[in-house]
């Protein structure tokens, strides 16, 4: 996670070289899987 | 000779549209896909030896996506969209600085087995950030041609143009994976490709990170956001004023010249009061529209639009909207038509329709002449504190009432008629980039001409219809003598008198009723209609019109027609009512149904009537 928005929500994530915003409420439903070998 | 058709596919913020503009120039035709409100852009390849049609598909992160835009891409590629033939070849646009993400979409497109070419944009940024990209190795690995371009500088465009002239020579890849591949498998393939071609991690984009540290700071970020919005708001109102005055003067001069040149009669009246007045009413808003679109495009191209949505998302979330709803709503301060069109940037249909439905509550500039006339006439210029006076506070109160009502209405809609699963909010924060003047001018030109075409034709047509209603039967003018008698005997006058029982509880008489009927075309038309009824020569002569409406007496009671309670009641009616044909038509077009504008018109009319009724009754306790 890079940062939260100035009002606390949503949050900024760094993923595969780009920046993505998601709401906190949606993070709970997020499933993270490692797609390839870790570098 | 039928053109060969090439579809441009790519994620948002990859420079796909810049590339499309570089390839097609000004030849693009913009419309909607059949039956949906997703924008369709198609153009002819410039300078080609054979006709090549290029279709700029909506931005998508993956095939089989969830948003309407993503579903359109899927349906066009599958050939299941009516009237949309399957493209002959596919051109995938990938941002070279985010190759790890973009190659996932490339993999999906390659699996379709169609003639394919991959274009890498932003290759200059890769070099600037210390990266290296072996384009030839990537081409060999993918089995299709790969070209590097810098769209806004024209680098690589000529070579791409040569390839585009012969898409039948593009290879058809055979990956043998189809749609069954899981995202994990796809990204494992992407990582393997990146390793094989030596596409290492780029240096961090320190410029973007440094700017974001300021613009997304909990305190400074909010201040910058408020300042930016204030600047846009101020620009719409102040910077447009000289151009707006110039257009009004030019239209008035054209009307005077027409009066001198044409023989007196209905043709001259229709031309000057109907056609020229209608065109002038639209053109007068053009400077505001141009400034608004220029500001929106600059903010978007620089990368701040996504940040603004990120900053304000939480507040919008309280009423069931998204951060992306904020700027369309802000745009409505100029005019609801571009504001509603700007809601196309909201991917979720639920939030998009909610934004569109509440947009007309935002105080558009067409309300300003009405507010100015009534406030200047009935609110005393009492000084409250320093430069702040009662008239200014009243004006601010009307703006605040509109904005607050929009938010409350959005909350009510997303909890009732638009109740449903809250869509997943995701948005990319692109790197900051300098906008290109050429691209910006082209974007503003397209947006402004679309506004004039869509809104202008409707307002023009309804203005002519209103002129006919106000002036037919023609014999009434000679018989009655006064302009008021002419209007009273006209079709519009009869309509106003028929409406009188319904609007009398609000304090309105038949003349205000005529003004309300006329203002259904466009709100500001009530001012010119009242000027016509009260025989004030020029609708811009506020002082004369103000004096005339203050002096008007009801013959049956001997009391003034316009009092402070009547003025307040009329102001509240204008805050709430949806009196704008252009807005209604654009709303229908953008939602793909007349059901939503019908709901908005009815609900807003009921709210306007109730609000005016309560305002009139309460204010009578104070002023009578």
Image (cartoon, rainbow, N blue to C red):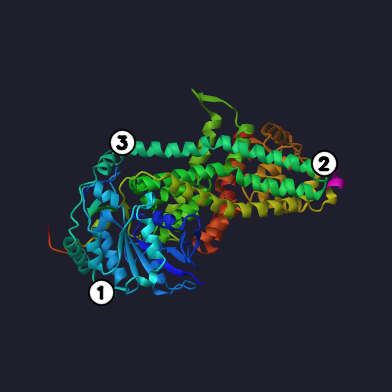
- B328 magenta-colored: no
Farthest residue, direction front:
B49
Disc 2 chain ID: B
Q: Is residue B389 above or below residue B67?
A: above
Check chain identity for marks 3 and 2: say if they share one: yes
Which residue is label 2 attached to? B482
Earlier residue among tags 3 and 2: 3
Task: Please name whichever residue, B535 or A34, is drawn nearer the observer in this view of the structure.
Answer: A34
Q: Is residue B428 above or below residue B172?
A: above
Quarter of the rendering occupied by the C terminus of chain B: top right
Which element carries disc 1, helix, strand or loop?
A: loop
Q: Position of residue B426 (x, y in %)?
A: 32, 56
- For the residues labelled 3 and 1, the Cα–Cα distance comes to 50 Å
Give the numbered dot on residue B175: 1
Disc 3 chain ID: B
Asked whether residue B363 appears in the rendered view, the answer is: no
Select label 3 or label 1 by which is in front: 1
Which residue is label 3 attached to? B220
Q: Quadrant of residue B295?
A: top left
Check chain identity for marks 2 and 1: say if they share one: yes
Which element carries disc 3, helix, strand or loop?
A: helix
The magenta stretch is B477-481
Q: Residue at x 24, y 56 (%)?
A: A27
Earlier residue among tags 3 and 1: 1
- For the residues labelled 3 and 2, the Cα–Cα distance comes to 61 Å
- B480 magenta-colored: yes
Q: Position of residue B607 (x, y in %)?
A: 55, 51
Earlier residue among tags 2 and 1: 1
Q: Main secondary structure of the magenta part?
A: helix
């Amino acid at each position: 996670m890079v940062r939260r928005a100035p009002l606390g929500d949503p949050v900024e994530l760094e993923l595969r070289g780009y920046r993505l915003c998601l709401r906190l409420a949606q993070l709970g439903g997020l499933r993270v899987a490692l797609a390839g070998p870790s570098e | 000779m039928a053109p060969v058709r090439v579809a441009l596919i790519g994620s948002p913020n990859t420079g796909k549209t810049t590339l499309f503009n570089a390839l097609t120039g000004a030849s693009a035709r913009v419309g909607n896909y059949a039956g949906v409100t997703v924008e369709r852009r198609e153009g002819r390849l410039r300078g080609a030896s054979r006709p090549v049609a290029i279709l700029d598909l909506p931005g998508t992160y993956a095939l089989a996506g969830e948003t309407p835009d993503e579903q359109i891409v899927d349906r066009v590629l599958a050939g299941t969209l009516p009237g949309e033939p399957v493209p002959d070849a596919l051109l995938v646009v990938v941002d070279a600085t985010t190759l790890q993400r973009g190659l996932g979409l490339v993999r999906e497109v390659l699996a379709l087995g169609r003639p394919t070419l991959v274009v890498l944009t932003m290759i200059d940024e890769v070099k600037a950030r210390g990266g290296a990209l072996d384009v030839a190795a990537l081409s060999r690995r993918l089995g299709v041609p790969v070209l590097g371009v810098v769209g806004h500088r024209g680098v690589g465009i000529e070579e791409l143009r040569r390839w585009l002239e012969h898409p039948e020579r593009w290879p058809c890849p055979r990956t043998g994976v189809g749609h069954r591949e899981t995202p994990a498998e796809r990204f494992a393939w992407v990582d393997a490709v990146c390793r094989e071609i030596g596409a290492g991690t780029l240096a961090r984009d320190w410029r973007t990170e440094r700017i974001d540290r300021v613009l997304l700071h909990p305190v400074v970020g909010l201040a910058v956001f408020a300042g930016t919005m204030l600047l846009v708001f101020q620009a719409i109102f102040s910077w447009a004023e000289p151009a707006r005055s110039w257009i009004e003067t030019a239209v008035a001069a054209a009307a005077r010249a027409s009066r001198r040149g044409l023989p007196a009669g209905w043709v001259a009246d229709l031309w000057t009061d109907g056609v020229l007045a209608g065109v002038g009413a639209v053109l007068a808003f053009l400077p505001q529209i141009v400034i608004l679109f220029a500001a929106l495009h600059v903010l978007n191209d620089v990368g701040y639009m996504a940040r603004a949505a990120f900053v304000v998302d939480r507040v919008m979330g309280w009423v069931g909207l998204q951060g992306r709803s904020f700027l369309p709503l802000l745009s409505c301060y100029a005019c609801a038509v571009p504001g509603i069109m700007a809601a196309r940037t909201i991917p979720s249909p639920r939030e998009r329709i909610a934004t569109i439905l509440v947009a007309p509550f935002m105080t558009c500039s067409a309300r300003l002449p009405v507010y100015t006339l009534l406030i200047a006439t009935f609110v005393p210029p009492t000084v409250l504190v320093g430069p702040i006076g009662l008239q200014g506070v009243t004006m601010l109160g009307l703006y605040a009432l509109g904005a607050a009502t929009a938010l409350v209405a959005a909350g009510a809609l997303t909890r009732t008629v638009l109740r449903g699963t809250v869509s997943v909010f995701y948005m990319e924060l692109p790197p900051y980039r300098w906008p290109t003047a050429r691209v910006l001018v082209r974007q503003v030109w397209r947006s402004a001409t679309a506004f004039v075409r869509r809104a202008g034709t409707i307002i023009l047509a309804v203005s002519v219809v209103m002129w006919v209603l106000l002036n037919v039967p023609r014999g009434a003018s000679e018989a009655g003598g006064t302009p008021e008698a002419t209007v009273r005997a006209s079709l519009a006058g009869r309509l106003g008198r028929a409406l009188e029982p319904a609007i009398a509880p609000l304090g309105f008489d038949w003349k205000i009723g005529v003004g309300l009927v006329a203002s259904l075309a466009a709100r500001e038309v009530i001012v010119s209609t009242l000027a016509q009824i009260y025989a004030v020569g020029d609708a811009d002569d506020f002082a004369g019109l103000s004096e005339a409406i203050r002096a008007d007496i009801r013959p049956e009671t001997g009391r003034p027609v316009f009092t402070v309670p009547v003025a307040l009641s009329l102001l509240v009616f204008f805050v709430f009512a949806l009196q704008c044909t252009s807005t209604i038509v654009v709303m229908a077009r953008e939602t793909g149904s007349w059901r939503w504008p019908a709901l908005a018109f009815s609900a807003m009319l009921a709210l306007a009537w109730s609000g005016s009724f309560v305002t009139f009754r309460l204010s009578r306790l104070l002023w009578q």
